Image: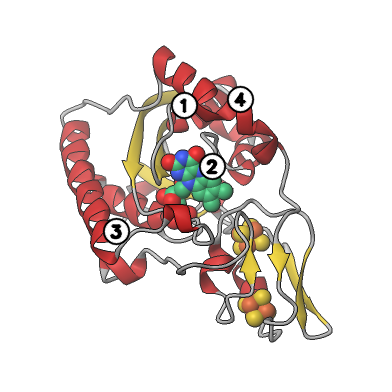
Amino acid sequence: MGEVMEHEFCAVYLSGTGNTKFCVSRLLKLLDEGAPCVAIEDMVASSTVAAHEKIVLGYPVQYSNAPKLVRDFILQNMELWRGKRVLCLATMGAFSGDGAGCAARLLKKCGAKILGGLHLKMPDSVCDSKLLEKSGEEKRDLIRRAEEKIGHVAEGIKGGKYPRDGLGFFAHIAGLFGQRLWFYGKTRKYCDKLKIDGARCVGCGVCARLCPMKNLTVEGGVAVPHGKCTMCYRCISRCPQRAITLVGKEVVEQYRAEEFVGE
Ligand SMILES: Cc1cc2nc3c(=O)[nH]c(=O)nc-3n(C[C@H](O)[C@H](O)[C@H](O)COP(=O)(O)O)c2cc1C
Ligand code: SF4
Ligand code: SF4
């Protein structure tokens, strides 16, 4: 316990394909090296929040909203947030008016103080849509720019200035009318649209081991989804048989941040 309290900051994040994990850990390293940085599905996520004063909460934007798992984590641990000071960090492939604001508003309802909001553009995790395909160079460039922004933001925070991405009134309107209103049905509940191609699946169980929702099991040699997917794309980006799809019908090119950041 003494060791945990040494740090002012901690971070809790959801990351399907590694973008958010990369961004959150980079920022935390610059702000408070060695501070705990835990995945939201980790059993110690809530006790880590409880033990710290300042929290970076990171997640990927989905249809200009925070993922259902992140919203549930906030609301199911309401009492945890009272008096905490939170920086909401949202990663995105293209656009999110108020990606950081979505969690910030819920956290405020739980009694947290919002330190700031940070938006970072990263390669798209949706790898089963041709429309979102980018070259390796474009992906590296996005990551390099995000790293630069993280560096500037960390300097600002050390000087007491937090970023305000996605927190203002106009950001809220942009997120709401830009996407959330039209696509709210997609993030309202856990998703039951994950598709497994039984002809491709070899029942290796990689997806079941990785899923933060424990949404997949292998039955009779084939993976079976159970309708509580938080759309993180982790299984889709890792299945060795490219047997899993969600938004599209076929995996175009699996994406994992670690292959582009060299970590
Ligand atoms: C279901 C889904 C919906 C998404 N919606 C958006 C969106 O509305 N706007 C956007 O800019 N990116 C969107 N993205 C892209 C991700 O937010 C982005 O790639 C993010 O950095 C992935 O982070 P991760 O690697 O930590 O999972 C979406 C991704 C998924 C899987
Ligand atoms: S990772 Fe792919 S091949 Fe392995 S069980 Fe899951 S769907 Fe099947
Ligand atoms: S089923 Fe796949 S996409 Fe859905 S939450 Fe689990 S790992 Fe993520």
Are the residues flagged by discs 3 and 1 in contact, CB closer than 8 Å? no
Crowd band around label 4 with a 10 angstrom C-alpha radius: few (<14), some (14–19), many (20+): few
If you read the primary sequence from the N terminus, does the residue marked by circle 1 or circle 2 appear first?
2
Q: Is residue 64 above or below residue 197?
A: above
The reply to whether callout 3 and callout 2 are in contact (CB within 8 Å) is no
Nearest the eye: 200 or 25: 200
From this view, report whether residue 222 is shown above or below residue 142.
below
Labels 3 and 2: the sequence-earlier one: 2
Q: From the viewer's perspective, is the residue at label 3 or at label 1 nearer?
A: 3
Q: Is residue 96 left or right of residue 233?
A: left
Q: Which residue is mark 4?
A: 181
Residue 211 found in image quarter: bottom right
Residue 59 is at least partly visible in this image: no
In front of the other: 181 or 188: 181
Label 2 beta carbon less than 8 Å to ligand 1: yes
Question: Do we see residue 62 in this rendering?
Answer: yes
Residue corresponding to mark 3: 139
Residue type beneath disc 1: Gly
Residue found 54% across the figure and 42% down from its top: 62
Ranked by sequence position, the earlier of labels 2 and 4 is 2
Q: Residues within 10 Å of mark 1 (few under 14, many from 20)?
A: many
For label 1, the SS is helix
Residue at mark 2: 62
Q: Tag 3: Cα neighbours inside 10 Å, few (<14), some, or many (≥20)? A: some
The label on residue 101 is: 1
